[in-house]
């Protein structure tokens, strides 16, 4: 399936969304990408775009949050490519998903690389990043990468249902987080500082 066809399908997903309230926990049928302790009591769910500069800025903060949580917080990442404004968002999402075929570690290496090098996301670049991360570069781009399109669409549809409008959008245990994306604020919001921040609101 060509990228323009995929984008058109995702536009249709955006148009036909229901106004009913949908729980954030209604997950895609695909395996989630989890960073940190899989059994952590607190889940930070991120909807992100690999070409979004705000997501790139948030990425190291979220990693520090997980690393400093002593197993109490895990990060779940879902794709929400803003394909109308970011020309490489879809192909980057597909390339990231391709590395998950090799396991969680290659995926998270690719995830980190894409944000660090988001100004260079051509097919050639994506192949190099996938190989460096431990994935198969032949799956990262082109027709071969289309096998991962359903996963990207499923993530995007889940975001639309949850009310996601931009990136990064974070949820903490099913509650939307609207505070600052800095380590101190997120530690408070996740209970690592002994209390929740007042900037948590429930999704529409």
Image: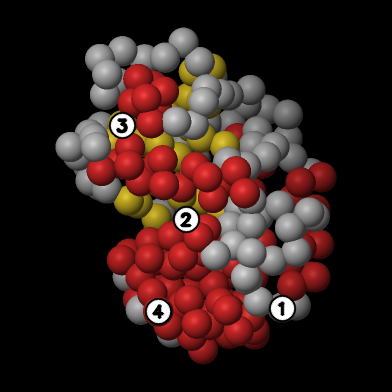
How crowded pointer 4 is (Cα within 10 Å; few <14, some 14-19, many 20+) is rated as: some
Q: Position of residue 60 (x, y in %)?
A: 41, 47
The residue tagged 3 is 42
The quarter of the rendered structure image containing the C terminus is top right
In the foreground, 97 or 188:
188
The quarter of the rendered structure image containing the N terminus is bottom right
Which residue: 33% across, 37% down? 65
How crowded pointer 3 is (Cα within 10 Å; few <14, some 14-19, many 20+) is rated as: many
* Residue 1, numbered circle: 1
Q: Looking at the image, is mark 1 or mark 3 nearer the viewer? A: 3
The residue tagged 4 is 132
Which residue: 75% across, 77% down? 2
- Where is 203 relative to 10, above or below? above
Say left or right for 160 vs 64: right
In the foreground, 56 or 19:
56
Q: Looking at the image, is mark 4 or mark 3 nearer the viewer? A: 4
4 or 1: tag closer to the N-terminus: 1
- Where is 158 relative to 182, above or below? below
* Residue 102, numbered circle: none
2 or 4: tag closer to the N-terminus: 2
Q: Looking at the image, is mark 1 or mark 2 nearer the viewer? A: 1
How crowded pointer 2 is (Cα within 10 Å; few <14, some 14-19, many 20+) is rated as: few
Marks 1 and 2 sit apart, C-alpha to C-alpha, by: 21 Å
The residue tagged 2 is 29
Q: Position of residue 98 (x, y in %)?
A: 48, 74
């Amino acid at each position: 399936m060509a990228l323009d066809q995929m984008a058109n399908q995702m536009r249709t997903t955006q148009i036909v969304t229901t106004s009913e309230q949908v729980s954030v926990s209604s997950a895609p049928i695909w395996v989630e990408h989890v960073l940190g302790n899989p059994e952590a009591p607190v889940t930070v769910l991120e909807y992100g775009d690999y070409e979004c500069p705000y997501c790139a800025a948030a990425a190291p903060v979220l990693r520090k949050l997980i690393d400093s949580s002593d197993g109490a917080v895990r990060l779940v990442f879902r794709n929400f490519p803003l394909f109308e404004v970011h020309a490489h968002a879809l192909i980057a999402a597909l390339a990231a998903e391709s590395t998950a075929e090799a396991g969680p570690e290659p995926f998270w290496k690719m995830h980190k690389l894409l944000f660090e090098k988001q100004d260079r996301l051509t097919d050639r670049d994506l192949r190099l990043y996938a190989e460096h991360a431990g994935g198969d570069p032949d799956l990262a781009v082109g027709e071969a990468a289309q096998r991962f399109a359903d996963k990207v669409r499923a993530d995007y549809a889940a975001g639309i249902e949850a009310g996601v409008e931009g990136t990064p959008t974070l949820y903490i245990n099913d509650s939307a987080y609207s505070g600052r994306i800095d380590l101190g604020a997120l530690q408070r919001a996740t209970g690592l500082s002994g209390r929740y921040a007042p900037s948590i609101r429930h999704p529409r």
